[in-house]
Amino acid sequence: MGLQRMIAATLLSTIAALSPAGHAQQADSSGTFTMKVQTDIVLTNVVVRDKKTGEVVKGLKANDFTILENGKPQKIASFDYQNVDEAAVLREKSTVIGRATIADLVNGEFATNPASLRDHRLIVMFFDLSSMQPEDIDRAVESAQDYVKKKMQPADLVALVSMATGLSMDQDFTSDKTALLKGLGKYNGTEGTGFANGNEGGNSGGTADDASSFTSDDSEYNALNTDRELYAIRTIAKSLERVDQRKSLLYFSGGLTRQGIENQASMRAATNEAVKANMAIYSVDSRGLEALPPVGNASTGSLRGTAAYSGGAMQSQLDANFGSQETLATLSSDTGGKAFFDSNDFAPAFQQVQHDTEAYYIVGFHSTNLARDGSYRHLTVKLNRNDVKIDYRPGYYAPADFQHQKTEDREQALTEQLRSDLPVTDVAVYLQALYFRMGDNKFFVPVSLIVPGSQIHSVKNGDRDKANIDVIGQVKNAEGLVVGNVRDTVKLALDAAQQVQRKNIQYSTGFVLAPGRYHLKFVVRENQTGAMGSFETDLQVPDLKKSPLKLSSIVLSSQRVPNAAKKSQNPLVRDGVEWIPNVPHVFRQDQHLYFLYEVYDPAKEKSAPEPASSPGLTRREGGPVRVLTSIEFLSGGTKVYETPLVEAKAINIPERGAVAFQFDVPLTQLKPGTYVCQINVIDDAGGSFSFPRMAMKIQPEIAPVVTPAAASGQLPGGGPMKP
């Protein structure tokens, strides 16, 4: 596969005098215009050797080569020759980069002076400690140390990367042998977890006669772990794509097993990123040459049944071992590298890397096939002489626009954006999270997402427009553990006559959480163009046990829609009506403003001695509740309106021990403008009070109207919640 790189060229020219007057606003203050041109260039490495001697053939020109893509000739657009014999002498013990992590390389400039890397071998040693046992680590580290001490050449620049609980760069590219040996020494003796290859699911061909026979099927976990390792390879490749030279990744692993087609998207993504970065993967099975006894080794109990005598147990072991090596072999072959299995001598892997990167030509072309369909395209490289042998990648995957992406690739893109630390802003997303108590240590947290309708692209279908959006989100607790997930596709059928561009789309879901601090992140994708937007925020769910006045969030709404649910744990659904939160707090003057909030466990009036003037009258212990509340509207610090005072004398939601308040305020009596709403809540019996404030705006003309999406979210540990 050839290196496929996206190049954005920005052309500046002072063509204001040649442009129509109607386009003058496109010019900046300097009078220049900016035109962006995006083009794809495919790069492939070609190694040319003499058939008889095996020596590298030097001095070839671009016109000596012919490149065909799917049998069609391509015009060579770039040509370069790399030769380690001509490597510039770097400062002794030099380090090319000074960054500490892979993430720094992804987000920043790879090398301040890329020319300094010319004619050098760029080798990344990647130790997957999560899949290696201690003896595997010792074997891999010792072979790497032997290479550094005895085989490393002046043209070699080596970096060290490892993955245990996370991916980290342990040593930047350097020719300093002392620094490399010190970095490798940190791996030696590391307690490897070796959890990558457990139970692969299915019949093992026999059952151990000990407690291990009751081990649960962890194939789903292993599928996630394989995705994690492939994502690490993709991240490394992405961090190196800014440099055109060929990179070699020596991947030391204790095996990598795919679970059917579940890891296919991650596999393709890792391969494509490596190809784009011009990085060949040389996989090394650090387990070396293994003996597979028919009845198992000392790490397992004796087998029951006939599998040990019929060959079933042996076949199962062979299948598992082959499966753990097959993925490594595929990664290597698809990226132009090689795989090394079933040998305790890893020196040939280092020799192969040096041999393959001794000297090579980098040939590039612009494909005549402009379709962005993600299809595989075969490459054929020919030379105008027959006495040589040429080596190159056999093809590459074309770039794919969103409409041509496969379902698993689309899902992978959503998941990766959810995991990413970087926000995406192609689609504007706004989020509001509230909280209502359900029990002593349990809160319901309704979440509302708003997407402007102007950013939703639709497809015409008669007199209605069809569109859909994908929503993915998660909630993490203070320890970083995921405690809630949402994944939904919302289908929208919009009446074209409703001026959709001026409306908003609102998605509602909810979670059941304990008091504490949480982090919420949601990603929304518009499914016509594939544009995505993300929003993340922190949420503090209070421990109301310590609060004198236990008050829920305050909901401001302009819409209440029918909801036939007879019983719902969503506090926004009551009496057959659902309250739709107004996230931006912007209302029209001709609308009604609805308030909803709850007070929990209000104090009750205590008994008092009989007054002398009123014989026979007493107040009993556990008397009536007395909670007073009203809402004030302030403009410029002056009160312009206040609702009548409401007094609650009893708990009206006994299952939650709550007094619920609902207000309906017609906005025709208020002038357009910005207001501060102060909610006055006084527990007269308990002697506690609260006066929360929030801003709102009233507009005189028609503003975007919230259209609730007919969607469902998933409650942790429960069924779907219909908003």
Image (tube, rainbow, N blue to C red):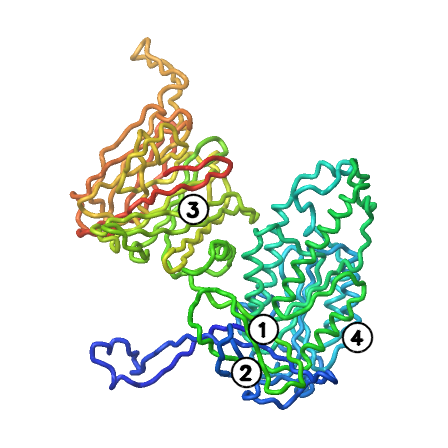
Amino acid marked by disc 2 = Thr
* Contact between labelled residues 1 and 3, with CB atoms less than 8 Å apart: no
Please tell me whether mark 1 sits on a helix, a strand or a loop.
Answer: loop
> In this figure, which residue is indicated by the disc labeled 1?
278
> In this figure, which residue is indicated by the disc labeled 3?
488
Measure the alpha-carbon separation of dots 3 and 1: 36 Å
**Quadrant in the picture for residue 692:** top left
Measure the alpha-carbon separation of dots 4 and 1: 27 Å
Please tell me whether mark 4 sits on a helix, a strand or a loop.
Answer: helix
Q: Residue at x 60, y 50 (%)?
A: 260
- Seen from the viewer's position, the closer of residues 546 and 322 is 322
Q: Residue at x 80, y 56 (%)?
A: 290
Q: Residue at x 74, y 80 (%)?
A: 153
In the shown orientation, is residue 396 left or right of residue 130? Answer: left
In the shown orientation, is residue 333 left or right of residue 5? Answer: right
Question: Can you give x and y, in whole percent of width and height, for residue 672 in the image?
Answer: 19, 51
Measure the alpha-carbon separation of dots 1 and 2: 20 Å
**Quadrant in the picture for residue 16:** bottom left
